[in-house]
Amino acid sequence: MAKIALAGGGTGGHVYPALAIGDVLRERGHEVLYYGDPERLEARVAPERGYTFRPVRAMQYPRGGIVGKLAFAWSLFRAVLATRGELKRDGIELVLGVGGYVSAPPVLAAWTLGARRVIHEANAVPGKANQLCGRFADAILLTFEKTRSRFPDDKPRHLVGVPVNPKVLAGDRAAARARYGLDPDRPVVLFVGGSLGAAKLNELAVAVAKADRDFQVLHLTGPRYHDEVKAALGSSVPQGVVLVDYEDRMGDAYAAADLAVCRAGSSTLAELCAVGLPSVLIPSPNVTENHQEENARGLEEGGAALVVVEAGWDLAANVEAVRALLGDADRLQAMREGAKALAKLEAAREAADIVEALLTGR
């Protein structure tokens, strides 16, 4: 059995797919370690899941200026040298990079050692780390067909999708609604802005909660915005509205809902498709090369989602769009079917198969 390193992180969209692949590889008897930023999400989550964690000190790519770029190049060189020593000591035979600036030093260090390199790109538009690492990879794992042309033609590229934690699929509708105190017989719209929330999305959630409606609202505010949302709702939370500051059992939230309103990170979209949940997607405008909108358009083209961009934001029209969807059973059913058709439930196992094939030379 082989010793494998997962590398990358910074956000759940990088960390959780990496761990899903890592879990499969561990099930198959491989030893898997995690190389990441000691100050970011992976430093907490990977050890909690039983992974040995190796800190990587790396600098984020600067937006402009020759001085900043020179400092970045020097920092990357030092990080590659330091990580090279760690990989040698750990006896790593393959590095799987999942994106985020911290993924580059382990992948490049593996190249200098002659160890195998695989990268996984979760978004429609590759980040800068994966654009760099793709030139040195033995295989590139993709989520969107349109991304294939963004990597070198001489590199094997495999469409596998974004691995999803199986726990997301385990939610039970009746039990989830009981847990949140929701009426089992009335429709539910779920608002979720991610672990830190999202201001525009929360604004829409508050407006929907205050509107005349015959459906319920389950709002995952994010810890940062929880008190602000409560204050915006007034002295008391309206009937049929449930506020949750943070949810670590997303399977319950998805199971309780008939429609989700959320950002368009790749992991979130993979989860929506896996559970067959229709969605209104509000891509974050504050991401590299607007990749969330590219991600979201893929679901919209597949009939699984409605995309609403923040440019030209019309709160009243967006409230009405949510209300109209929840009142249109036929369209919701078509969106469910569209989401399920896009799901790639075997993504983690397919990725693990490719990793093992590289290790054995098949």
Image (spheres, grey):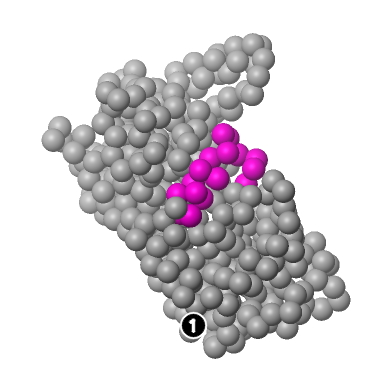
Residue at position x 49%, y 66% from top?
278
Q: Nearer the viewer, residue 88 or 137?
A: 137
Q: Do we see residue 226 in this rendering? A: no
The residue where tag 1 is placed is 175
Q: Is residue 108 left or right of residue 248?
A: left
- Say what secondary structure mark 1 lies in: helix
Quadrant containing the N terminus in the rendered view: top left
Residue 126 against residue 47 in the figure, above or below: above
Residue at position x 36%, y 58% from top?
343
Give the image location of residue 63, x and y in percent.
Answer: 64, 24
Q: Nearer the viewer, residue 66 or 319?
A: 319
- Magenta stretch: residue 298 in it? yes
Residue at position x 48%, y 55% from top?
300
User: Residue placed farthest to the right in the image?
Assistant: 235
- Magenta stretch: residue 33 in it? no
The answer to which quarter of the image holds residue 208 is bottom right
Report the amino acid beneath label 1: Ala
Residue at position x 62%, y 68% from top?
322
Q: Do we see residue 73 in this rendering? A: yes
Quadrant containing the C terminus in the rendered view: top left
Give the image location of residue 337, x and y in percent.
Answer: 38, 67
**Magenta residues, start to end:** 284-300
Residue 356 against residue 341 in the figure, above or below: above
Q: Of helix, strand and loop, which mostly describes the magenta segment? A: helix
Q: Is residue 190 left or right of residue 99?
A: right
Mark 1, other Cα within 10 Å: few <14 / some 14–19 / many ≥20: some
Q: Nearer the viewer, residue 36 or 173?
A: 173
Give the image location of residue 265, x and y in percent.
Answer: 53, 49
The answer to which quarter of the image holds residue 31 is top left
